[in-house]
Image (cartoon, rainbow, N blue to C red):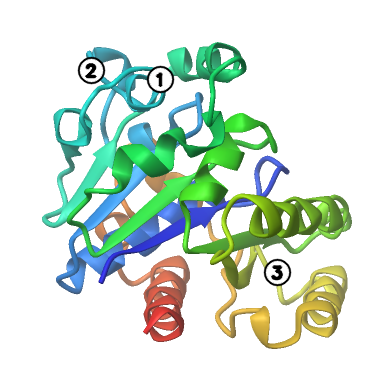
Amino acid sequence: MRHVIAVVNQKGGVGKTTTTINIGAQLAKNGHKVLIIDADPQGNATSGLGLNGNVFESTTYNLLVSDTKLDTVIQETYIPNLYIVPANPNLAAAEIELSGEDKREFKLKDSIKNSLHDFVIIDCPPALGLLSINALVAADSVIVPVQAEYYALEGLSQLLNVIQRVKQTLNGKIEILGVVVTMLDRRNSLSNQVHDELKRHFEDKVFQTVIPRNIRLAEAPSFGKAIFDHDKWSKGARAYKQLAKEVLGRVS
């Protein structure tokens, strides 16, 4: 049964794209058919898998603003079973072009309804605009990456309020699958305090797996690779392998 996950946090630099790519890659390596939808005009999920979003005639933009069929937009990645709908800066115009459309919040949901993938993972932009709302309306569940730093909790209440409003008015089935703590430095007492605070606030919604601050993880996107193909023995690779296992357990 297909499961759609939106990876969302309106703060930038918290590990949304890294989480999207590496959960997707690990699920694909486990034999699941996975589709990543790059819903960020920066196109980092696209470039992070070694693709250039500017070379494709059809991207997420076309999926949202025209009647482009999903199967004409999907691209293969270098990882078997892992596919992507790429993005480029054109996607920024979609927010404006959709603003006057009827049922504009349902464009992505309608576009992917016939997907035959086991998992669809949507990499959201660092904003709670129409692109993120489309992702939340299309999603069965949400993963919220939160960086273990001082301002981590700032804005989370706003995000939770938006998710709740979407649940009440546009998508009654959406649930928070989990909060994942990223860039955790165990030597830093502040990082540990933030982790403890998140566990107090979200309780069992916080994934047991935490993503450490790891140079190999930070390098991987510049090589266009998932962490498992950049350095499978790194702490980052071990963490994302475990996180994907947790995600699978919670979805099941």
Relative to the observer, which residue lies in front, 12 or 64? 64
Q: Residue at coordinates 76% horizontally, 52% vertically from top-left?
A: 159
Q: Which of marks 3 and 2 is in front?
A: 2
Q: What residue type is labelled 1?
A: Asn
In the image, residue 128 sits, relative to residue 208, either above or below, namely: above
In the image, residue 252 sits, relative to residue 105, either above or below, namely: below
Disc 2: which residue: 56
Q: How crowded is mark 2: few (under 14 residues within 10 Å), some or many (20 or more)?
A: some
Marked residue nearer the N-terminal end (1 or 2): 2
- In which quadrant of the rendered image does the N terminus lie? bottom left
Q: What residue type is labelled 2?
A: Phe
Q: How far apart are marks 1 and 2 (CA)?
A: 9 Å
Relative to the observer, which residue lies in front, 126 or 78? 126
Tell me residue 208's x, y (percent): 59, 85
Give yes or no for contact between labels 1 and 3 (Cβ–Cβ under 8 Å). no
Q: How crowded is mark 3: few (under 14 residues within 10 Å), some or many (20 or more)?
A: some
